């Protein structure tokens, strides 16, 4: 186990170093958001993910199976929160430029304004913390040596868009959020909705970037599992303090899946989608506990026929 953790740390420490603290210039976020939005749907089409969900989970209504309707993109100038959201009734994905700028500034500071050793295509890691549970996780992104801000913007926008796309899948094809809201008991019953979206976000981020094929990329997922074990140990306290845990829990589940499958993530995507569709809090915790205590097992289990 120690050798695996040492290997993880070695990869991470070898790709960056601190230099002068200069805040990079801001980019044209509209173009970046629009480009990332289209790229997200291109990868979904390439993998036939939307068609797979339609064919296998589409709701039958009046002898007609529901079809996915691509949401419209709406970019807001001034709204500061949230980073992104899915508007159910208008079928729109809304991205806030102000919130993205604030998020990127925060993580540039957390990097210490690091510049990059290497060329375009090298991997860097965003180490970010969440004060609500005092944890630090790693997020890989590909270097743009001319503009680190743009590289980080693209990374976060890409992940946010995939999160909101899953919300649109849940409503357009599965009809889960509306059904749960009406029949089970209001907003607090939608936690699994955010859990699934967060898990999908992580998995698609790795697939869209090709990190699942690069050991330097999916090693970040291994590193995150250590923090995820601590996270689930503190969940009862977090919930008592009024902190919503499905986002972090979904993030952790997604990292487990990435670490487990690594290079075979794409080949197993339909099986993974099946599991996300049926994912709930109890199952996510069980998976994190199982694999969190068996990191070496994950590395030898990438071709298993079961997610658990």
Image (tube, rainbow, N blue to C red):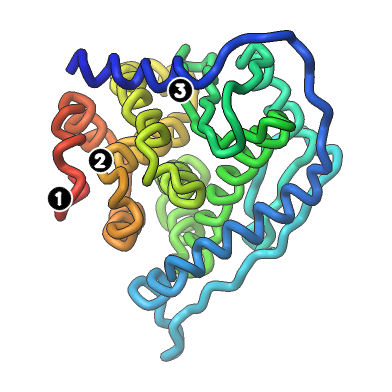
Q: Which residue is mark 2?
A: 260
- Helix, strand or loop at label 2? It is helix
Q: Can you see residue 189?
A: no
Residue at horizontal 74%, vertical 10%? 21
- Helix, strand or loop at label 3? It is strand
Residue sitting nearer the eye, 124 or 276: 124
- Helix, strand or loop at label 1? It is loop
Q: Which residue is mark 1?
A: 304
Asked whether disc 1 touches disc 2, contact meaning CB atoms under 8 Å apart, the reply is yes
Check the picture and name the quadrant holding the C terminus: top left
Q: Can you see residue 15?
A: yes
Residue sitting nearer the eye, 247 or 297: 297
Q: Which residue is mark 3?
A: 137
Asked whether disc 1 touches disc 3, contact meaning CB atoms under 8 Å apart, the reply is no
Kindly indicate the quadrant of the structure image that contains residue 274.
bottom left
Q: Is residue 58 above or below residue 116?
A: below
């Amino acid at each position: 186990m120690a050798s695996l953790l040492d290997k993880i740390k070695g990869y991470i420490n070898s790709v960056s170093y601190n230099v002068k603290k200069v805040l990079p210039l801001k980019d044209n976020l509209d173009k970046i958001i629009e480009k990332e939005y289209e790229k997200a749907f291109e990868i979904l089409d390439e993998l036939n993910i939307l068609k797979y969900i339609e064919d296998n989970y589409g709701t039958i209504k009046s002898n007609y199976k529901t079809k996915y309707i691509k949401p419209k993109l709406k970019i807001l100038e001034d709204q500061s929160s949230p980073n992104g959201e899915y508007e159910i009734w208008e079928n729109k994905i809304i991205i806030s430029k102000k919130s993205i700028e604030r998020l990127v500034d925060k993580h540039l500071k957390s990097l210490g304004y690091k510049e990059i050793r290497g060329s375009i295509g090298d991997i860097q890691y965003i180490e970010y913390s969440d004060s609500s549970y005092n944890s630090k996780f790693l997020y890989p992104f590909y270097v743009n040596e001319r503009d680190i801000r743009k590289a980080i913007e693209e990374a976060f926008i890409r992940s946010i868009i995939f999160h909101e796309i899953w919300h649109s899948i849940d409503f357009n094809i599965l009809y889960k959020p509306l059904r749960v809201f009406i029949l089970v008991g209001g907003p607090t019953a939608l936690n699994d909705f955010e859990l699934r979206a967060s898990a999908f976000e992580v998995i698609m981020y790795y697939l869209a970037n090709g990190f699942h094929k690069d050991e330097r990329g999916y090693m970040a997922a291994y590193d995150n599992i250590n923090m995820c074990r601590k996270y689930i140990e503190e969940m009862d306290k977090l919930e008592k303090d009024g902190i919503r845990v499905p986002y972090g829990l979904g993030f952790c589940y997604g990292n487990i899946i990435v670490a487990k499958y690594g290079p075979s993530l794409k080949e197993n995507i339909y099986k993974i989608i099946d599991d996300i569709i049926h994912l709930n809090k109890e199952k996510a915790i069980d998976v994190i506990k199982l694999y969190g205590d068996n990191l070496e097992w994950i590395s030898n289990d990438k071709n298993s026929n079961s997610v658990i």
